[in-house]
Amino acid sequence: MFSGMNTGSSERDETVTADAQSDGNQQGETQAGQGLGSKAPEFIKARRALHLSWQVGIFVIGLAVVVVGIIMLPLPGPGWVVIFGGMAIWATEFVWAQLVMRWTKRKLSEAAQRALDPKVRRRNIILTSIGLVIVGVLLGIYLWKFGFTMPWKIDE
């Protein structure tokens, strides 16, 4: 039904996808057929005005989610998770957000692999143990010097 219609993809998006597929590096590889570009339904991409309003809507929704995430950073709440959720919303429509998400996923998987390295794990366990010993010694010195008094029994 829509085979003869314009899909709304620009030459730039097609060029980026072609360059990414021909590039041999890890960043350029497509993941399970996921190309760069709009993920909007075909009937929306077929109409330029509708596609533009779709993009504006996606941008506004993503921006609202990212702003809420930024507000949550100093407050209680999952600020970074919400920010990455907003980026994922943007990535459904914008190539730049898709590239940021791919870079982020690659860096997170590299960090996970480094964290699983036995040498790194041993170092982290040793540093954590040393930190706990230091905190225990400082707590012991504090209790020895000032004692332990419940807050509701403090004499003024």
Image (tube, rainbow, N blue to C red):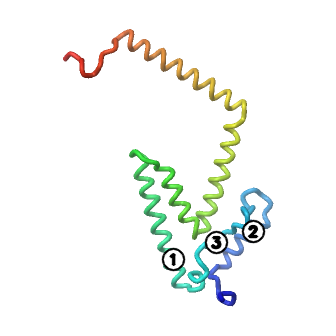
The disc label shown at residue 37, or none? 3
Residue at figure coordinates x 75%, y 61% from the top left: 29
The disc label shown at residue 54, or none? 1
Give the distance between the C-alpha atoms of the residues marked 3 and 1, in whole angstroms. Answer: 14 Å
The disc label shown at residue 69, or none? none
The residue sitting at the left extreme is 156
Amino acid type of the residue tagged 3 in the rendering: Gly
How far across and how far down the image is residue 5, in percent?
65, 88
How far across and how far down the image is residue 55, in percent?
52, 74
Q: Earlier in the sequence, mark 3 or mark 2?
A: 2
Residue 7 vertical position relative to residue 140 in the rendered view, above or below: below
Residue 37 vertical position relative to residue 148 in the rendered view, above or below: below
How far across and how far down the image is residue 112, in percent?
66, 42
Q: Are marks 2 and 1 in contact (CB under 8 Å)?
A: no
Badge nearest the viewer, 2 or 1: 1
According to the picture, the residue beneath numbered tag 2 turns out to be 19
Splitting the image into 4 quarters, where does residue 20 fall? bottom right
Q: Earlier in the sequence, mark 3 or mark 1?
A: 3
Which element type, helix, strand or loop, lies under badge 3?
A: loop
Residue 124 vertical position relative to residue 109 in the rendered view, above or below: above
How far across and how far down the image is residue 144, in percent?
39, 9
